[in-house]
Image: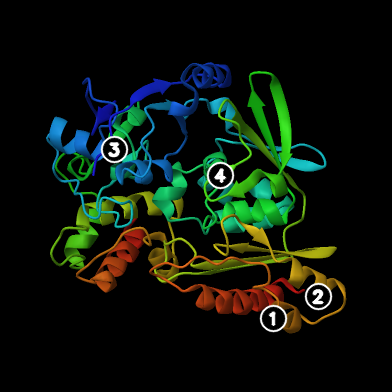
Amino acid sequence: MTVNGHDQRHDVEPRTLLVQFLRETCDLTGTKVGCDTSSCGACTVLVDGESVKSCTMLAAQADGAAITTIEGLATNGEQHAVQRAFTEHHGLQCGYCTAGMVLAAVSFLEENPNPTEAEVRLGLEGNLCRCTGYHNIVQAVLAAAGAK
Amino acid sequence: MIPAAFDYVRAGSADEVLAALVEHGDDAKILAGGMSLLPLMKLRLATPSVLIDVGRVRDLAYLNDAGDHIAIGALTRHRELETSELLSRECGVLQAVAAEVGDNQVRHRGTIGGSTAHGDPASDLPAVLLALDATCVVRGPSGERTIPAAEFFLGFLETALAPDELLVEIQVPKTGATGFAYQKFNRRAQDWAIVGALAVCNGTTRVALVNMGTTPIRARGVEEALASGSSAAEAAGRAAEGTEAPSDLNATPGYREHLARVLVRRALEAAGA
């Protein structure tokens, strides 16, 4: 598979989860393990451009896919529009959910480029922020949609 | 949480899946999107010794107009159901309920066949198949057979699929773009339904309940009452008849029965029954 555009070829145990593979084999620790039960969305990455919870996918299932993690979202050192919007609108408090939120938002905006606030909230239903900082996260996603 | 160790077999075609099922028998589980199976394996509630990954059998991912019905390949993802113009026009209820499954991340991976074969009474889609009298097409070593949805769900996580069979297609009738409503009650947006109630009005009115027994079930008492001229509100009073609501952290059986009556009334009213 490719991770952030780089080839990654490794032999793994069948039961290796994609999130483990990314964190432990590829040494990309930006992707977080939160609930580990596919509820919280902290482990969200893009698989062929679509948001997926990497704690609920085997690395073997992602064989041949193109994975994007938070480390690979910027291009040529320039942050993605969603990353900039999270910075500008203070779309984070402790930061633990942020990588997953940003990637879920990137995937959501690909599918729905001009969302309403209600659609943003529904579109991020799979991502929990236990600081309950949803207000600014939603503002950031709306701003990123407007900035495109 | 990591699943218990297992052997991984990747199937490239339906025939390879069937051959692997014959080889590994009861020890094997089929892995489609993994949205139900992998969480169970991580909790060690399921410990298959072999996983047969069917995710690359892409010729089982399709949505076709088959004349008098819509044919849906078992590996069609919820996201594809949710965004299908064909379904929106010809079977709006399936499209709308598919959009209620889990969250975006789950719908990107989960499949209609996986959800159906898993047979969880708290899942959304099995109730739709039941209400629509959908047909499940399964393939085994001796060929294909069809199973009506009413005979497919046998018990908690138990279906009519034999250990050597693969669910390959689901056929749903053309019920049109409107005339249905799904009421899903839960405490967090992405959660399973604590109780769900689906009403489909297409000539007659059919009502299916989610998480009110060991399988998805039809609310026959409500359907009979409506057929004999009761109002939606009166008929909904019979919503808990014949149910065996589970008890868990979220709700007692009594509370679920109350929810069923309220949600069925709302669904009937919204569907125009």
Figure quadrant of the N terminus of chain B: top left
Real-space CA distance between mark 1 and mark 3, rounded to the nearest whole angstrom? 44 Å
Q: Residue at x 50, y 23 (%)?
A: B25
Q: Which mark is residue B3?
A: 3
- Marks 1,2: beta carbons within 8 A: yes
- Marks 3,2: beta carbons within 8 A: no
Name the N-terminal-most of marks 1 and 4. 4
Name the N-terminal-most of marks 3 and 4. 3
Viewer-nearest of discs 3 and 4: 4
The amino acid beneath tag 1 is Gly
The amino acid beneath tag 3 is Pro
Q: Residue at x 35, y 46 (%)?
A: B39
Classify mark 1: helix, strand or loop. loop
Q: Position of residue B80 (x, y in %)?
A: 55, 44
Classify mark 3: helix, strand or loop. loop
Q: Is residue A51 visible?
A: no
The foreground one among B165 and A11 is: B165
